[in-house]
Amino acid sequence: MTFEDAVNFLESLAGFGIRPGLQRITKLLQLLDDPQNKYKTIHVTGTNGKGSVCAMLSQILKTANIRVGLFTSPHLVTYRERIRINNEDISEGDFAALVDEVKSCIAQMIEEGNESPTLFETLTAMAFKYFADQKVEYAVIEVGLGGLLDSTNVITPEVSIITNVANDHAEKCGGDLLGIARYKAGIIKQNVPVVTGADGEPLKIIRDTAQKNHSKIFVLGEDFFVDESLELSLKGEYQKLNAAIAIKSVQVLNDSRVTDSVINVAIKNTHWAGRFEILNINGKTIIIDGAHNGAGAEALRKSLDKNFPTGRRVFLFGVLRDKDIDTIIENLFRTTDFVIVTRPDSERAAEPESVCQRLQTKGIKSIAIKDNDEALKFFLDRNEEVLISAGSLYLIGNIRKLLKKMK
């Protein structure tokens, strides 16, 4: 099986959509000899920041000379980004071999009368199997959606992390903010410590769940704090919060190899694409950020206001139609901004013309250019001080790839 064949097979599973539940992933992992139980894990959920926290955790463990796996989603350019060891993407050959092996298990499941796993469940099983085959000591596992019924929620980690709780995916996670909090608290296991940056009513739910599970909880702003003196390579004001959560989580592991000096070096050298990432292209400063929900949009706006407080901003923006688009617009844009709206590479993409209509009702000037290449060319022709590509990860991944080719 070639890498292209592997990707085609995986994407043939996309038609099964998102189907919460653990029965399919449990059966698939049983056929693979339950690889997820053969190494230590760290489980990370949250509305925003979980990818950055995972990247920091992986870098800290790697810097401590610990062999570490990293499973994240979605990818920006290639599926290989989702499965990493010591921050190196899985090779095309290993990826294809994994798909071939898991495909046989899926065929057996179907023959026995079971439902086919979804695309994400298959990727999850592949990651767990690869980490076992590669004999990692730890694996950092990012939740795909919610937590309680997410296919990653078959592990018993060393520490459970809930970065924050905000309104996103409510229709799939309990219907409202408190429902989302319950779903995310669903990753908490008996006697497994919890680290969180949540506050308000969601924190109460997380605290109650931790108490019921006899799990010690560490809360940002109460039990640990942001270190303003810490030097981060990741830009954006919100990364200081993420760093505090990552650092507390590795401290909870109580591994003597993870010293303060290791942590400082690792945080300084953590890189995570598409999160307030600053590129210089032909003398222009371009910021790329996956502000794909209301909380992410608010965090990006704060970072822009601090780092680029004056001058007109031009955005290259695209969003998925199942997001709270009005809240994203309200939290991200100023009335002086100019927004070029294009279409993310997803069947869930909002049409640019409809997004423009929403922007115009807020008094924000915009133009719809559906094709990404055309939109990017128009974007780069602007003469403003700062250019920002933001919104769906399905958009910024493609824009980042096009910009890297130019560079």
Image: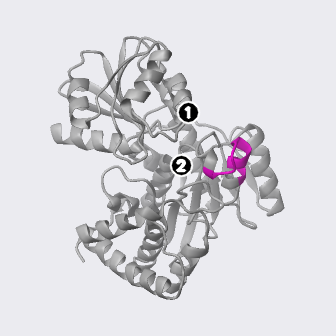
Q: Position of residue 103 (x, y in %)?
A: 38, 79
Q: Is residue 76 above or below residue 107?
A: above
Residue at the image position 22 percent from the left and 24 percent from the top: 378
User: Residue 32: in sight, yes or no?
Assistant: no
Residue under label 2, please give it. 50
**Disc 1 marks which amino acid?**
Gly
Query: Of helix, strand and loop, which mostly describes the magenta segment?
Result: helix
Q: Is residue 318 above or below residue 116?
A: above
Name the quarter where the C terminus is drawn: top left
**Disc 2 marks which amino acid?**
Lys
Q: Is residue 37 left or right of residue 89?
A: right
Tell me the element at label 1.
helix
Tell me the element at label 2.
helix
**Location of residue 403 (image quadrant):** top left
Q: Position of residue 213 (x, y in %)?
A: 79, 63
Residue at the image position 20 percent from the left and 21 percent from the top: 381
| Disc on the earlier residue, 1 or 2 | 2
Residue 6, magenta (yes or no): no
User: Residue 17: in sight, yes or no?
Assistant: yes
Name the quarter where the N terminus is drawn: bottom left
Count neighbours of disc 2 (C-alpha within 10 A) and say few if under 14, some if 14 to 19, many if 20 or more.
many
Q: CA distance from mark 1 to mark 2?
A: 15 Å
Residue 130 disc label: none
- Per the rendered image, the range of residues in magenta is 172-182
Residue under label 1, please give it. 294
